[in-house]
Amino acid sequence: MSDTVLVVGAGPTGLSAAAGVASIGKKVVLVEKEAVLGGAPILSGYAKLVPSGEWAKDAIGRMVKRVEDSPNVTIHKSTKVVKVEGEAGNFTVTLSNGQSVNVGSIILGTGFTHFDSINKPEWGFGTYEDVLTTTQMEQMVSSGKIACPSDGRVPERVAILLCVGSRDRQIGREWCSKICCTVSTNLAMEIKEISPQTDVFIYYMDIRTFGLYEDKFYWKSQEEYKTKFVKARIAEVTKSADNRLLVKGEDTLVKRPIVIPMDIVVHAIGMDPSEENPELAKVFGIGLEKHGFVEKGEQYTSSFSSTRRGIYVGGAALGPEDIDTSISHGLAMAMRAVGDMNALVQKAA
Amino acid sequence: MSDTVLVVGAGPTGLSAAAGVASIGKKVVLVEKEAVLGGAPILSGYAKLVPSGEWAKDAIGRMVKRVEDSPNVTIHKSTKVVKVEGEAGNFTVTLSNGQSVNVGSIILGTGFTHFDSINKPEWGFGTYEDVLTTTQMEQMVSSGKIACPSDGRVPERVAILLCVGSRDRQIGREWCSKICCTVSTNLAMEIKEISPQTDVFIYYMDIRTFGLYEDKFYWKSQEEYKTKFVKARIAEVTKSADNRLLVKGEDTLVKRPIVIPMDIVVHAIGMDPSEENPELAKVFGIGLEKHGFVEKGEQYTSSFSSTRRGIYVGGAALGPEDIDTSISHGLAMAMRAVGDMNALVQKAA
């Protein structure tokens, strides 16, 4: 029997899970497939996070440092889990670096994969240089300068297209990606702050700034930063004779076709199931739900259980998720893991 | 120094916090102001919960039983906290039943108060017998019979009005209540299942079935259960000469006034800050945010901290929240509390 906890993935979910377990003196083995810790916010260079407004590198950086500084956490970077044998309380886990660890439970914070806009070709990504994704636009915000990639001019108009790779049966993405609406209303404000002469338009189906994000992001973006919200069905993004981008669609409120010339078009890309999920399902012996996210068990007295006993799953591995909730999932899984191990130890004694 | 944890509130948040702390053998004192445990889902008689589809009394009942059966949890029902002295690691807490407890940390799962529809009088609640709230409609669903309260007839049409007490600056509710959209799409399906001859209309501003709720609830309700979604601005609910309810408003998609006769009108009521929050703020010495929910501290490495050290807050006390997330907050706070106490003990030693 081991009461060491294996945490897979070092994004917000895994980092908080590792910190939680370590905080009561239990040992953690943290395995991250990338060479750096921090997950999507660090790897993709997010700018200021919602809802805190803190820079991703600072906020997530603090989470990374806490885990790196903990004497209870052993970190394996650029490493994957290749084999899991045994059962709850006594798993033998083989890593891609050749090492083997004995752990009592396993926490998966394996996250998601950003939607690849190439799969929505009619909206211009990959065709036009000035069509970007939200993560690319966040990198531009981080750089402190808003300019068209094609020629460096300051954009007069920026369009953010919501639901790229979300709520779209045509391309097999029936889910909503939960946080893109809020991220986009925030991004519009960040663009306006850096470049006051730029007007930002958000094309939407529904604005889903749920809970306290409503007035903090949606209303504020509209009222204080003059972000323009257009309820529209987008048909395509093309280019005009004078080299501007044309967003063509139907305004579903006024029931008229609209074509507004834009200088930059941003795809608010959705959250796909991690591309590694089929492999994870095989290695860890767990189920996936119909869209390809990890399947969860009962959610009231066994929250964050996967379909295999002793293996817990949370954060964006379960479906599109925001960072704050992912952090709560990580801590919650830490509690589940140490609680269940305590029960196993008591039973054995 | 004490490592006992005080948990205030026995809804989904508090019950999962108590179970978490107890799961590693630490003592919990659970204080609930009502005479029964379970919080809003039990007190208000919710029907089937989203997203599990399990009856509230079963799902939450299981959470209650686990805590009641735990030898580590002492429960005080019909009890409030009246005084808190001391500091993290050593709080002396006085209860309304005259008892005093020494605890190391305090977890607040004090929840919310349902919006009172009387505060939106032009929409007919309190005036017409057949205007109900979602919680009343859930009670009707639980009874297994859908009928107009006024005369017992089976309704030909039911209207669910979203955002009653949410996203409404006129009445001082600027926030979105997060889960009413999903609950309402689910309620429409439950009504249709019991009463197939009833047509259900949902009047909305935006449909916010975020994440995996999109196809599981919104699309399913629309496609399989033929729920009709009307994007509208509601002006008032009145009564026709033949005694039916008239929902008057403007269809914002076709830009025309609409008046559809209904037999039952349901207010999808929002989540207000707990009416006890001003008192809680005083007793526990914590801050409230601008809407009146409990103020939270840093959310990356100190998630669920309140503004006072050693006191944690989560669930709907922080803002409108769904049950699954509230459960994750409860477990996360349990982890925070036992982790921080462990650090205090080590520091003292």
Image: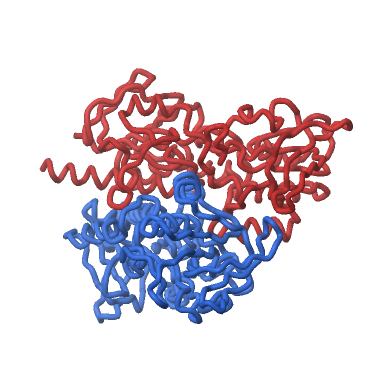
Chain colours: A blue, B red
Which residue occupies 34% across, 61% down? Answer: A47
Q: Residue at x 57, y 74 (%)?
A: A237
The answer to whether residue B145 of the structure is visible from this angle is: yes
**Nearest to the observer: residue B202 or residue B235:** B235
Measuring from the top left, give residue B132's x and y in whole percent.
69, 34
Work out whether A317 lies above or below A243: above
Q: Which quarter of the figure is the N terminus of chain A placed in?
A: bottom left
| Residue A242 located left or right of residue B297 | right
* Residue B165 vertical position relative to residue A347 in the rendered view, above or below: above
Q: Quadrant of residue B123?
A: top right
Pinpoint residue B348: horizontal percent, then vertical percent: 12, 41
Q: Nearer the viewer, residue B136 or B331?
A: B136
Is B249 left or right of B293, judged from the image as shown? right
Residue at the left extreme of this rendering: B349
Q: Is residue B169 left or right of residue B95?
A: right
- Image vertical order of residue A74 relative to residue B77, above or below: below
* Residue farthest to the right, as pictured: B242
Q: Position of residue A61 (x, y in %)?
A: 25, 60
Quarter holding the C terminus of chain A is bottom left
Can you see residue A7? no
Percent across and percent down for residue B116 are: 59, 30
Q: Residue at x 35, y 67 (%)?
A: A139
Instruction: In the displayed orientation, state which residue is furthest to the front.
Output: A242
Relative depth, front residue between B267 and A106? B267
